[in-house]
Image (cartoon, rainbow, N blue to C red):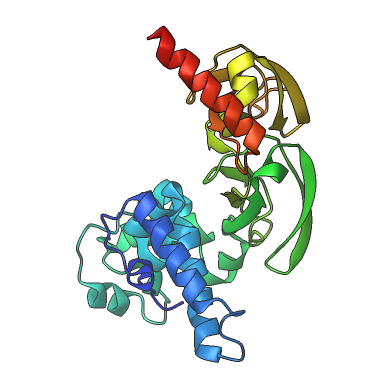
Amino acid sequence: MDYIDYYKVLDVTKSATEADIKKAYRKLARKYHPDLNPNDKEAEKKFKEINEANEVLSNPENRKKYDKYGKDWKHADEFEKAGYDPNQQQNRQQSRSQYSGGDFSGFEGGDFSGSDFSDFFNSMYGGGRSSRSQSKYRGQDFNAELELDLKAAYTTHKQNLTVNGKNIRITIPAGVENGQVIKIPNHGGPGVNGGQNGDLYITFIIANNSDFKREGNNLYADAPLDLYTAILGGETHINTFDGKVKIKVPAETQPGTKVKLKGKGFPVYKKENEFGDLYITYSIKLPTKLSDKEKELFEELAKLRNHEK
């Protein structure tokens, strides 16, 4: 397996944060996505490299192994058990001359004496290359993005996904947030020689096409209130994700008045029957196209107010 510099693939530095990696991945994935580059083999190849790099670097545990072992990062657990340290320097040619015919490309830079190397080889492969295929390796973790609109994220529901050519059906709990990542165990790459499957990590992208602004479990919205109800008081109907609710409006309600509707916000993730609150801000809607009679009445009201002053 040739060494691939995953940091170079995503055009980030080794000091990049998880947020930097996620941002770079999304940008490049959109640029080279097959749907935007039909019949472009180079774009398809680049898209696969980008996903491969993201699958490794977006997982902190895998990234740590990759930084230490490079292309052999999948064998990190076996290396650790055998006490192999790639940071120790050694003349690789000398080791090769002592064990001519061996395939030691995965252990570049190790510092072994003849007996040490033999012990390491035996611990890894049972005494010979023929048993190398018996080592169990965990499968690669997969990463995927799933787009939902805010209304869909309001309720628990099932959805079918196609990941790496396989169809899976998952349950999406109500209340998932934008950017939230959930793990689906054993739905990543297959293990080798009976090793455990990798996991699938799904990042949710929540699109908000509603009239509500979401902050955590609370929702915020503006509600128009006609002039007469604002002045005299009465009732108004407010939209929620569960339908319209009727609330009372006190007389002389001012523009910008805020009202809290307890329990009418967003569901709390994985907590049944728990909801945030809905905060409504009133905006006063002034009447237009007044009749002559209405204008006359407003003029009388204005005179009364001015007279009182």
* Residue occupying the far top of the picture: 308
Q: Nearer the viewer, residue 191 or 123?
A: 191
Q: Nearer the viewer, residue 80 or 214?
A: 214
Q: Quadrant of residue 22?
A: bottom left
Q: How many marks on residues?
A: 0
Q: Is residue 170 left or right of residue 20?
A: right
Question: Residue at the spot x=56%, y=34% of the render?
Answer: 286
Query: Where is residue 300 shown, x and y percent of the image?
Result: 54, 21
- Residue shown at the point (25%, 54%) measured from the top left: 15
Relative horizontal placement of residue 89, taking residue 295 as reference (left or right): left
Q: Is residue 197 above or below residue 165?
A: above
Q: Quadrant of the C terminus?
A: top left
- Residue 217 is situated, as x and y percent measured from the top left of the image, at 57, 28
Residue at 28 percent of width and 72 percent of height: 95
Can residue 4 be seen here? The reply is yes
Q: Is residue 49 visible?
A: no
Picture residue at 33% right of the left edge, 58% below the top:
67
Which quarter of the picture shows residue 37?
Answer: bottom right
**Does residue 141 appear left or right of residue 156 in this picture?**
left
Judging depth in this view, the residue of 148 and 195 nearest the camera is: 148
Residue placed most toward the observer, 193 or 172:
172
In this view, 100 is above or below 251: below
> Does residue 236 lie above or below 197 as drawn?
above
Give residue 171's position: percent from left, percent from top.
Answer: 76, 43
Quadrant of the rendered image containing residue 126: bottom right
Place of residue 214 in the rendered image (x, y in percent of width and height, measured from the top left): 55, 36
